[in-house]
Amino acid sequence: MDQLWANRAASAEAAVATRHLKRIWKVPGTQLGVVSWPPTRHDGEFRTWHYWWQAHLLDCLVDAQVRDPQPERITKIHRQIRSHRLRNNGSWTNSYYDDMAWLALALERAGRLAGVERPKALKKLSEQFLNAWVPEDGGGIPWRKQDQFFNAPANGPAGIFLARYGDRLRRAQQMSDWIDETIIDPETHLVFDGIKAGSLVRAQYTYCQGVVIGLDVELAARTKDPQHASRVHRLVAAVRDNMAPDGIINGAGGGDGGLFNGILARYLALVVTTLPQNGPADAEARDIARSLVLKSGQAAWDNRQTVDGLPLFSAFWDRTAEIPSGGGKSAEFVDGAVNASSIPERDLSVQLSGWMLMEAAVTVSDE
């Protein structure tokens, strides 16, 4: 293991643990991430609930356990899972299919890689995605229940989960085909956000590229169908050409956007570790993906601030981080999305992305 990146990942983990991890409602044996630092009173009491941020916190804890297995981290993983359900009104599910897909991915990895298994939760979540598939309405699965917006942030992670979980390859392949036929930009080859009532929503976000890369890497590794590797090659090159000036992945500010660049880094790392190597095009995609992760990682590390000896990452990895203060607006949920704090570095999402990137750099430097 590359010790430099392992040390940086450990520092990122310690920063999130120190600033954000807290017992929920003083209940013993619990823990979630406080969504702001310095926290508002409202956030510190867990009156704020950003379901999918907590799923990514769990995913990062699993990354750390793979890097450096520790019994006390297994305790944290157990606590995170238990507390997620507790804070979510005793339920695993909610109204947003993308949220549920992120949790399903994190729970599946916790079971497979850290031995913390939740088979009933995985079964319940998988049924949500299988039952939401509506080709007759133009989907895909929708973004949320009773909605006609079919998007990459729901279909990508749900597809990755179904490819990994049980024997759901056929549905995962149908989801990949739907994305390829419906929401790929013919000019740049990037992924559009989605399709709403038959009209393209043309926004292009880094994490949409990440989840589609992840889906096709999983399918390339699990099926004999060569088109999935071709889709990975095309999309990795499109990300390099359109979303990573000077080789550094674009940031998207705070709030939900704080997670976007970290998610892309996670799935670029999967290209390096998991895409079958059958020829020069596979090797090229792997090398581009590795370079994007390592260059972004170096930039994020160089542009961090250090507070009490621990890193604070910037929302934009090519710019110096700004140290947040206790005042100003904290991130809040509006119309199905979380807006940024007035200083985006305050948001847990931004710090999780920095941590995710450091863990991704560990895995690609190992290969």
Image: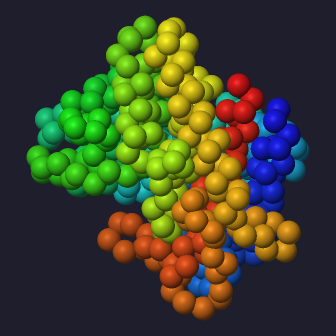
* Residue at figure coordinates x 55%, y 25% from the top left: 286
The C terminus: image quadrant:
top right
Is residue 117 depicted above or below 33 in this figure?
A: above
Going by the image, does 236 lie left or right of 61? left
Is residue 4 depicted above or below 42 in this figure?
A: above
* Residue at figure coordinates x 76%, y 56% from the top left: 13
The N terminus: image quadrant:
top right
Residue 356 in view here: no
Residue 242 in view here: yes
Front residue of 71 and 186? 186
> In the orientation shown, which residue stands out farthest toward the left?
198
Is residue 272 depicted above or below 210 in this figure?
A: above
Q: By what rule are the colours in the image chosen?
A: rainbow
Going by the image, does 198 lie left or right of 222? left
> Could you tell me residue 56's position as x and y percent?
59, 52
> Could you tell me residue 316's position as x and y percent?
54, 63
* Residue at figure coordinates x 53%, y 37% from the top left: 267
Figure quadrant of residue 3: top right
* Residue at figure coordinates x 47%, y 47% from the top left: 244
Front residue of 225 and 315? 315
Figure quadrant of residue 53: bottom right
> Could you tell me residue 156's position as x and y percent?
39, 39
